[in-house]
Amino acid sequence: MRTNLIFVRHAHSLYTPEELTRPLSEQGLKDAGKVTEPLRTVTVDHVISSPYQRAYQTVQGIAEHHAKEIEVRDEFKERTLSARPVDDFHGAMERVWSDVHYSFEGGESNTFAQLRGAEAPYEYCTNIRARPS
């Protein structure tokens, strides 16, 4: 059985320290519609989102068009930058991108986040295939 995956990165949001409930910006809401448009003509069996509001909002139009519920999966969340809010978000991002093994206290390195990110879709697809029809 062939499985096609389409990954959609969340649309634009404005940085706030509260990761979970950070919504899309006005531009992000417009861009989410642009993401939905080309996916209207493809078959979509599942719509998955991380628990972050901005990710959910980005795929909401896709789910609505295809009459699918959005499956919220924690393992699809973004990398945790730090356990505490950072004072200089852009500086913090430069730091972690300049050293893929570096992580702030309570955060994930790029290397760790990439491994987790690669494992999540594989495990999801394996579990979907194992579900009774």
Image: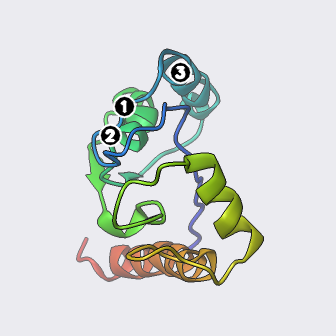
Q: Residue furthest left?
A: 132
- Residue in the image at 38% along x and 78% along y: 129
What residue type is disc 2 on?
Answer: Gln
What residue type is disc 3 on?
Answer: Gly
- Residue in the image at 31% along x and 65% along y: 74
Contact, mark 2 vs mark 1 (Cβ under 8 Å): yes
SS under mark 2 = helix
Spatial CA span between label 3 and label 1: 15 Å
Residue 69 x/y as whole percent: 26, 43
Report which residue position mark 3 lands on.
33
Report which residue position mark 2 lands on.
53
What residue type is disc 1 on?
Answer: Pro
For this view, does 16 lie left or right of residue 27? left
Instruction: Judge the density around disc 1: few (<14), some (14-19), many (≥20) Cα neighbours within 10 Å.
Output: many
Task: Name the image colouring.
Answer: rainbow
For this view, does 13 lie left or right of residue 50? right
Residue 79 x/y as whole percent: 48, 65
Relative to 24, residue 45 above or below: below
Name the image quarter holding residue 102.
bottom right
Spatial CA span between label 2 and label 1: 6 Å
Name the image quarter holding residue 1.
bottom right
Comparing labels 3 and 1, the label whose residue is closer to the camera: 1
Nearer to us in this view, 70 or 66: 70
SS under mark 3 = helix
- Residue in the image at 49% along x and 32% along y: 13
Residue 112 x/y as whole percent: 54, 82
For this view, does 95 lie left or right of residue 79? right
